[in-house]
Image (tube, rainbow, N blue to C red):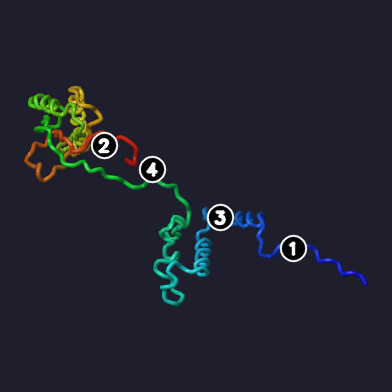
Amino acid sequence: MAMPEDDGPPGVPEWVVTYGDMMSLLLTFFIMLVSLSEVAADKKYRSVMQALQNYMGYPTAQPSPPGKNFPMNSMVERLTQLGSFRDDTNGHGGIKRQSVEGLDVRVYRNRDGDAVPAGPPILFEPNSIDWTSSAVPRLEQEAKLLAGKPNKIELRSYAPKVDNLRESLRHYDLAYARARKVLRYLEAAGVRRNRFRIVTAASHHHSTELNLPPDRVEIVSLNTHTDELVGPREE
């Protein structure tokens, strides 16, 4: 009687995962991450996210009441706050438009603090860039007061509107020319150029300035230093 053949060595159990299988799973996982990181079709992406949430449940699925309504803090409700969301109803038909150039699109307004007049206003002759005889002594006194300080300086120039249409169109230019003349004098007297800021108010006066002469340039020291605006943006 022939002896039965011996069984071969036992094979690998079914639960054993080889190194190659593990690498294939990891590769598939990373491919899925890369695919979802760049969403080209936002509607399809939202459908995928909704299907995943329906299958795996929401973070607050247990305390949520039963039914088909989405919880208020679910992923579907928060899609509008995600960077991958794009509103197709903005009137542009889904066409991408070039963004605003710069670090960001936010506009910052720096607070200059309290404005302190450096002295009496510099008076000018009507409809002229020539200042009066009292202007030079005032400029010399204010230049000594402002030289060597770090504060920003604002030159507020005024010029009244005249009846002639041609002249009325240039009263802003006249106010600017007056401020430039004061700036050049103060700069020659030792005040640094990067401290100045010209404001052409022309014929617009505040209610507290109605009793002042209309042809004037006010020299105002601001409670802000020029060095505060120099440096990286995060500072």
Q: Amino acid at mark 1?
A: Gly
Quarter of the N terminus within the rendering: bottom right
Task: Indicate which disc residue 35 carries.
Answer: 3
Q: Secondary structure at mark 3?
A: helix
Q: Which residue is mark 1?
A: 11
Q: Which residue is mark 2?
A: 228
* Residue 31 screen position, x and y as percent: 59, 54
Q: Secondary structure at mark 4?
A: loop
Which of the two discs, 3 and 1, labels the residue nearer the N terminus?
1
Q: Secondary structure at mark 1?
A: loop
- For the residues labelled 4 and 1, the Cα–Cα distance comes to 63 Å
Which of the two discs, 3 and 4, labels the residue nearer the N terminus?
3
Residue placed at 78% from the left, 62% from the top? 9
As drawn, which residue projects farthest toward the bottom?
A: 66
The residue mark sitting in front, 3 or 1, is 1
Which of the two discs, 2 and 3, labels the residue nearer the N terminus?
3
Q: Is residue 27 left or right of residue 160?
A: right
The residue mark sitting in front, 3 or 4, is 3
- For the residues labelled 1 and 2, the Cα–Cα distance comes to 75 Å
Which of the two discs, 4 and 1, labels the residue nearer the N terminus?
1
Q: Amino acid at mark 2?
A: Glu
- For the residues labelled 2 and 3, the Cα–Cα distance comes to 45 Å
Q: Amino acid at mark 3?
A: Ser
